Image: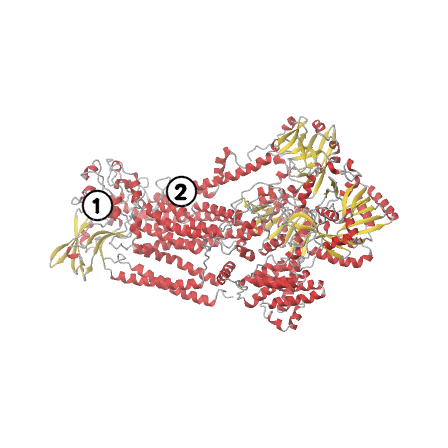
Amino acid sequence: MFRKRPPPEEERKVKANDREYNEKFQYASNCIMTSKYNILTFLPVNLFEQFQEVANTYFLFLLILQLIPQISSLSWFTTIVPLALVLSITAVKDATDDYFRHKSDNQVNNRQSQVLIRGSLQNEKWMNVRVGDIIKLENNQFVAADVLLLSSSEPHGLCYIETAELDGETNMKVRQSVPVTAELGDPNNLATFNGEVVCEPPNNKLDRFCGSLYWRDRKYLLTNQNMLLRGCVLRNTEACYGLVIFAGPDTKLMQNSGRTKFKRTSIDRLMNTLVLWIFGFLVCMGVILAVGNAVWEKEVGSLFQSYLPWDPPVDNFLFSAFLSFWSYVIILNTVVPISLYVSVEVIRLGHSYFINWDRQMFCSQCNTAAEARTTTLNEELGQVEYIFSDKTGTLTQNIMSFNKCSINGQTYGERTDQMGTQPKRLDFSPFNPLADPQFCFYDDKLLESVKVGDVHTHEFFRLLSLCHTVMSEEKSEGHLVYKAQSPDEGALVTAARNFGFVFRSRTPGTITTSEMGRTVTYSLLAILDFNNIRKRMSVIVRNPEGRIRLYCKGADTVLLERLHPSNLELMTVTSDHLNEYGADGLRTLALAFRDLSEEEWEVWSESHRFAGKATDCREDRLAASYDLIEQDMMLLGATAIEDKLQEGVPETIALLSLTNIKIWVLTGDKQETAVNIGYSCKMLTDDMAEVFIISGHTVQSVRQELRSARDRMMELSRSRDGGKRGGMEGWAEACFMGNGFQQDQEGDVGGGKVFHSPPLPSPPSSFMDSISGEFGLVVNGHSLAHALEADMEAEFVSTACACKAIICCRVTPLQKAQVVELIKKHKKAVTLAIGDGANDVSMIKSAHIGVGISGQEGIQAVLASDYSFAQFRFLQRLLLVHGRWSYLRMCRFLCYFFYKNFAFTMVHFWFGFFCGFSAQTVYDQYFITLYNIVYTSLPVLAMGIFDQDVPDHRSLEYPKLYEPGQLNLLFNKKEFFICIAQGIYTSVVLFFVPYAVLSNATQSNGVPLADYQTFAISTATALVIVVSVQIALDTGFWTVINHMFVWGSLGFYFTIMFALHSQTLFRIFPNQFHFVGCAQNTLLQPVVWLTIALATAICIVPVLAFRFLKLDLKPQLSDMVRYTQLVRQKRRRPAGCGIGSAWRGTGSVTESRLGARGGSRRSGYAFAHQEGFGELITSGKNMRHSSLGLVSFASRHSSSWMETLRRKKNPPNASGDCSPAPSHASDRVPPLSNSSSVLGGSQEETVTEADQNIQSVPASLSQLEASAENLTCAPVRPQTDSPGGWILTLETVQEALFGWKGAAARGNTSDNQGSPRAARESIQTE
Amino acid sequence: MVRIKKESPDRPDNTAFTQQRLPAWQPILSAGIVIPGFVLIGLAFIGVGVGLFITSRDIQVLEIDYTGTDQTSDCNKCTNPNTKNCVCTLSFNIDTLFKGPVFFYYGLTNYFQNHRRYGVSRDYKQLYGDLANFKDPSTDCAPYRLDSRNNPIVPCGSVANSLFNDTFKLYQIVNGQRNVVPFDGKGIAWWTDYNVKFKNPDVTPLQNAFNGTVKPLFWTKAVYELDFSDPSNNGFINQDFLVWMRRAALPNFRKLYRRIAEENYTNGLPAGNYSLEISYNYPVLSFNGRKKVVFSNVSWMGGKNDFLGIAYLVIGSLCVVMSVVMLIVYAKFKFPEDD
């Protein structure tokens, strides 16, 4: 910004080890600067920025006006004091913010890196690294700049990087140097390296690089494969050397980070508009009064000149009117007092502290509290409509765990915690010294089965130990470290390791394992590598006995159809298991093997070799040859891997979607992974009418896909619509039809009372709306690029917004920001972006609210964010509790604030008609100065900071309470006008009541009361009392502080008034305090008090009546919740019914649905698997020469290896109490429903009775019960309730029953009989 | 929930304040409070209103315009601006005893003492007896700061300059005899004005302090000549001057001139004929102003004030009516309070 930019580069030329040459081009240095000011520029720049605020300039303008004596109707200090205050507070805040930015910049800039200077490695700060330098990177270090990989400690110039900071993908990636430089190796050779790189100019494309290296008169092409980008972390590579190509701001990371924008809330913008309107209003008032002044001066003033001559410069009425206009602008300016801005800031600051202080948003595992890093956005948290979430590290922990498996038709890994006891974690160490102590498994049946030597189980784990592309390192005997390309594979191989089939090492031709303590070496004949189309991988091995076997693991869809026909029975059982796993959101893989005879192998390997040699369509030919041999396999079983979600993610998402917040997941991961997570965190459900996948590669196809998706949606909702209309009359029947319960109920004589009269209050249209919203959309990165093009935008938005859940995969950081911008632009809705990595920074910056997940490795996201906390689930509290409160408080504050200032100021307007439009103020100028700062500021601040309509747990219970914020109901233009009207009404009362009373009144000693000072005091006192009573009415939550402030302010008013009117003060400054003695003289008069009481009554009584009637006739949900809360408090026992339960019913709907649905299977190959690793292995490229063929080779290798892997398995600080995985079965039941006695009690009862399989049924039944309760006894007025509640409730009934049936069918016979009984019992408990 | 054995120092404090769990009173506008509240307020207002109304009715007020625009009025002769030292007489009669103490006011209409420029035009320090401001009055006083020969005017400014200078004498006509009704002019100004806000300079004789200054343009006597007979009523602390300097809030106002509570008139003005002798000096016709005199007595709540009583009655009745409406509404659309 402040740097003079050289003309845009067209081509970058970098010469290694030649600083003089490179300096010619003035490339950006590696110093990054995100701060805005330095010490010298701070004052002018900051002031300049501040005066760009309309309000500040406006007040400055007023100040100038006040300095003109002819105009000045108020002393200058009434403006300058608050203005100076505001400017300095803001300046201090800006300075602190910038200070922290400097600090973080410095921290980054001062990181150490090793630079090769004149042949020797020297430590340099990052900021001093130049383009063209050769730097050395060590394992686990961040890459300092975008560098060209020259050589590495690993063979073939390979090195591994983790790009999580950059694109969010946590699987390791391989980078390889150009062969010619890979040979350079050590610093001595590199020092003489003088190649020149010519490449593209800096850009933000993370996956592309093109350039060429010229060295020794030869040209080598460079691609992205040769580049290490800033923000990556070097993994599994001892050290490497690289040539800096792009530095600092030119790096792809920084190019992707987007500009820092000043964020404003919508309330801010509304406020600014309103301030402009008020300004217009002010001008109108001024004009009216100026015209009045002109008329008055002409008609009256000119005649009155004998007593009050015109000032010499003011020789005619027109000029006088002109001056009077400005004078009135000055005295009426208090309608927008500058203290408004200060107060808003103070309130926001208070709210931010409450966020920081919230213990329920403190993560004890990582010891991090939530932090509001920006203090200006709090109320917007109460208005969020779209959430854009990153996946890795945000929704998931990025830990894969081997969770369940099915071997030969037997499923293992169920957690048997029916009784609520934590099952014991299996201890592998006595059985297997090579076991990984981090590994968790709970089902001892599996271990037993291994121990007794079950053939299938052994073969199962043998497959897992052989069929993969993992590399192992054994630092010392028994300390195995696996380098897995994807965490899923690591998990599988580790599982096999713990169950006694330890993969120990590999060479290009062999795999050495230790099976049940016996070392076995297989010769590896072929790796049939994974790719996206095949969705499977196989290995062909020859065991020591010489038998050849093919082991295959892959997506069940592709694998099951390649089985030998004899597997049919096993396949059915396994398929059922796979369904179950899928329903739990686990990633599944099916495993199979095939015995090959020597001949078969020979034949096939010939054809394979032939295919491999083919020059054209090599891929296809290879695939075809793979296909040939992967046939007639024998099924072994299936595995289920859990991509561990963060704690509470599904519940949070369910709760948030109940508030009508739409959640988009934007991830750099591939489609399958993303979809899988979508399912496991319940964003996508099998209940969805359809999930559309947009994956076109051209504009045309994307457009086509979007359109057809939309058509399909229309069609589906139309067909529902049609069915609906037909069946409207018999809707009650329709609800129960086909679920078998109706008959059941009829058979049961006593049970009839339960469902005797379900009312059907819901208008069908909204029912359809809720149905037709149930679509999911998955968009691929390359399609997204097309969808984001200008002419496609609208199409994309309209399709996407019709869907309930949207997942975008393979998204670049910049695209994330573009998506956010798109929604901001087209939907005018408040957006929130949440993420944890550097790849989320641009999205976080462009959303209205950016949230960073802290406590993970990177801090870039947190630094760019507005709020940060450690776990995704805190989002619900941030939005539903803090956001909601902030919004409510801010709205109440603003309403009251505008009200009180209009009431205060407009009195001057009315007075104008009686004082010759001379801009005479009604009040003492000290009162005017102090009114906003002292007399009325604290109570409204207390309300703005502490007010609560309903307690925090209620707002989590009734997510609908969040809606007013999204619909912007509490403070909008209409509300504003109501406030203004009330303020003006009050001002009329406040002027005309004293006017009517006092004009002829006298004191009891005969002295008239109609003197100016008495009038001023009476009006001012009445004003202060009226606004105090009003704030007392507005305050819904009277803490000690509110009491103190309200009463204190009144006390202050009287104290200060008496002080200002005291004789002492007058004697010291006879010029300043003209109101001497006025307070006691006036306030001792009964008439004055009668006047004040009258004015107060006239102002307040209508408000009170209106509010009461509104509460009675049109209660808001929050009123009802508040009311039931109070009733409950009074009775000291929970009221199980009332409106509340209806809402509670809606609150838990999703839960029941999630539990009850049947599963869909998703392939475990969803994980971030890349093809080509098989080739890498068989070619031996990634093997150390020294290690070939040896088992215990790797001892020299870095201990950091271990750390890396450990950290992956177990996040920092993960202690014993956090590591057990949240069980799906047990956690499914209640998280959303509250602990109301009726609900909770019956739930427990049924849970213990029913089988685990159908645990979800009781949950839904108890909802059904809740809703039934609600149908029968809650007095309901359909017109006031949102119909949504009803529909969903009925839906629940229906679904619960469907679900029950489905689950029961799966269960065994006794369950089948037991559960309806349990269900019926639970219904009857009511 | 995860149990924490050792409290981490970073964990936010568990206080009611930080966790927003301060005990609080959460009022709700329930029918049980609002409806009885309205009835109570209504009844209270009606009670007060009745009291005020009755009290106010007992207060007697006699108001006589003496501007002289009316041809029949004796003061018509004085309306000519050229007439100097004009004296006119106003006769009136009182039917019943005008209960004492009786207050005698003069009133002006269409007179803008509350005009901003008018109000500003004075020098508080000067009036506080600050001699420095005798020499150099505040610029606020312009255009009545200096006279044409640049002599400072004391007291300066429009307010002082326009001091009301009509004087009144009241006679009771008893058997053709004119008995002077004694006026009491003590303590008609605010105590604080007299004792604190206005002060003569500490110079004796007072006159010396005014050397080098001129009297306000409209005045016939200097400020130190306002009451020769009584030094405690002279200069800036002259009661009439003080009363004038306390400016009125509204363009139609009256100011206390004298009290009638002495000698035979301690109980008030007996029925009979009275004659008011006015020395008519203050021109108001130029700006369509009116002048009047007012006789009034007071109650505990001051002078006659019908508005207050009526307003209280109206508001009180409205509250009661409102409470009935609310009761009906409440009964009809009952808030779901019982479970």
Q: Where is residue A172 in the image (x, y as percent from the top left)?
A: 70, 42
Regarding residue A921, the answer to whether it shows in the image is: no
- Please identify the quadrant where the N terminus of chain A is shown: top right
Disc 1 marks which residue? B238
Residue at (46% x, 61% y) in the render: A1110
Q: Position of residue A715 (x, y in %)?
A: 66, 59
Q: In which quarter of the image is residue B146?
A: top left
Q: Residue furthest front?
A: A430
Is B101 drawn above or below residue A10 in the view shown?
A: below
Q: Nearer the viewer, residue A434 or A880?
A: A434
Mark 2, residues whose alpha carbon is within 10 Å: few (<14), some, or many (≥20)? many
Disc 2 marks which residue? A79
Q: Which amino acid does label 2 sit on?
A: Thr
Q: Count the numbered circles shown.
A: 2
Q: Where is residue A1128 in the image (x, y as percent from the top left)?
A: 50, 62
The chain carrying label 2 is A
Regarding residue A177, the answer to whether it shows in the image is: yes
Q: Give the CA distance from mark 1 to mark 2.
A: 38 Å
Q: Which amino acid does label 1 sit on?
A: Asn
Q: Residue furthest bottom?
A: A749
Q: Which element type, helix, strand or loop, lies under badge 2? A: helix
Colour scheme of this structure image?
secondary structure
Residue at (34% x, 41% y) in the render: A70
Q: Which of A1270 and A3 is in front in this view?
A: A1270
Q: Which element type, helix, strand or loop, lies under badge 1? A: loop
Mark 1, residues whose alpha carbon is within 10 Å: few (<14), some, or many (≥20)? many
> Is A1021 displayed left or right of A803 in the figure?
left
The chain carrying label 1 is B
Residues at marks 1 and 2 on the same chain: no
| CB-based contact (under 8 Å), mark 1 and mark 2 | no
